[in-house]
Image: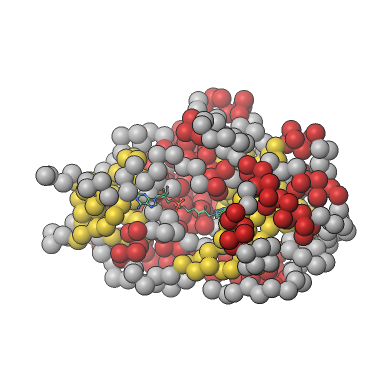
Amino acid sequence: MTIPFVDIAIIGGGPGGLALAQGLRKHGIDVAVYERDPVRADYVQGFRLGLRQRGLDALEANLPPHLLEAFLGTLGYAPSESLIFDEYFHPLAAPEWARGPEDRHGEKSVSRITLRQILLSGLDDIVHVGRVFDHYAEQADGTVVAHFTDGSAVRANVLVGADGANSAVRRQLLPDFRIVDTGMRRLAGKMTLDAAARHAISPLLLDYRTSIRPTAGRRIMFSAHRVDPAAYARFGLIGQDDATHRDIAGFHFDNTTSYVWWNTAYALNELATDAELARLDGAGLIELLLRHVGHWDERIVTLIRNSDPSTVAMLKVRTSEPGAVWETGPVTLLGDAIHSMTYFQALGGNSALHDAGLLAAQLVAARNGGKPLLPALHDYEEAMREHGYEAVRTSLSAMLRNAAADPVSGSVAAA
Ligand SMILES: Cc1cc2nc3c(=O)[nH]c(=O)nc-3n(C[C@H](O)[C@H](O)[C@H](O)COP(=O)(O)OP(=O)(O)OC[C@H]3O[C@@H](n4cnc5c(N)ncnc54)[C@H](O)[C@@H]3O)c2cc1C
């Protein structure tokens, strides 16, 4: 059997892998993406992403002009002004550490569904879905062969593991690499803005990025994601509901409705044991949370009580341990595959996009500018480790600071 060849093979069609594919294709580089799942319907896909300058810069560099225009033209909007209250809506001042320099675009709210529609555009012939990477084998001629669980394989000059936090590529390249459970358990949910109007939800929870910092208990953050699909119609299917989600019940993957969302995080066993949490559906989780916050101001309680149960779920907050360094070869890593982090600070997806920008630039220098391939990969890895590991640390410190600031019993394990 002849094994097909591609210059750059990317494992994983998440934001990082697809943004890299866009950047390489834009410069005429031979690239293919191998993605496991035909439909992206993991829980967080139903939420928006916060945008940072580093993510925007990478999209500007990697997307062709018409897709960049579609990205900017279909951005959702979030409130840019922040408010802080205690649980009885008494205003609180922001702590000093919350006022540091930022590269956030707080008012820009990126639908993950729309971003995926954009990143997949024009790549039909090079994105292969239903292909599950299994292992790779380096060849004597410096190429690498990626093997898939269906028995197929592809040979490439460079294999990029962009296959997320549980990366199978990383497992082979860096067998000692660890992802650890921080002990925090995140609970989040959404309500459509139409439902918010029916329940007379306070503008304080809809028109601002509002953090409730209770005198005792865990904080909850509220924000909104506003979209205008009628205005996006000029971009065709981009910004509309995604056909791949049509058969999924509930509002969670509805991409054309504006919503208010909230999230909170509790320590291990503080709400319930993991086994109990796993048994509860969205309605059960709302009920459980209300046992902790049901005495708060009625405006907060009304929003939580009436959140759409299909949008409520618990996630274990995990982080990688930053610091791994390896000898540069034909296999490299990008995004969550090498620097997965907690969701605090909205850095993970932006860091994956940033990697895609860095790696595309190096591969373009190698293919179109005469730079030798291994030094190009080495320079990418150095830059990626510097910003990526820093982001992991920043995100974990933010989580620990948040958890420690809340006066409750229950410990948070530092990773
Ligand atoms: C609750 C929560 C909130 C977040 N909020 C934000 C935010 O506001 N801003 C932000 O910047 N980041 C945020 N993040 C982080 C962000 O979601 C991730 O950092 C981002 O998705 C990483 O992109 P990626 O392309 O590296 O990996 P992924 O998005 O994980 O994509 C990996 C892809 O690889 C595929 N794959 C996996 N294994 C295989 C295999 N063996 N073979 C083939 N394909 C495979 C998967 O199907 C997937 O499509 C948040 C994360 C969480 C959990």
Camera sees residue 135: yes
Point 31% across, 45% down: residue? 131
189 lies above or below 344? above
Residue 295 in which image quadrant: bottom right
Tally of numbered discs = 0
Residue 97 in which image quadrant: bottom right
Q: Position of residue 269 (x, y in %)?
A: 65, 67
Q: Position of residue 344 (x, y in %)?
A: 61, 61
Looking at the image, which is closer to me, 295 or 120? 295
Please indicate whether residue 379 sits to the left or right of residue 404 in the image. left
The answer to whether residue 369 is above or below residue 227 is below
Query: Could one spot residue 70 in this view of the protein?
Result: no
Relative to 59, is 265 on the left or the right? Answer: right
Residue displayed at 65% across by 55% down? 187
366 and 119: which is toward the camera: 119
**The C terminus is located in which quarter?**
bottom right
Screen quadrant of the N terminus: top left
Considering depth in this image, is 8 or 165 the residue closer to the camera?
165
Query: Is 21 left or right of 51, judged from the image as shown?
Result: left
The residue at 55%/47% (across/down) is 43
Return the x and y of residue 77 as percentages of the image width and height: 66, 41
Rendering colour mode: secondary structure
Q: Residue at x 48, y 30 (%)?
A: 243
Quarter holding residue 175: bottom left
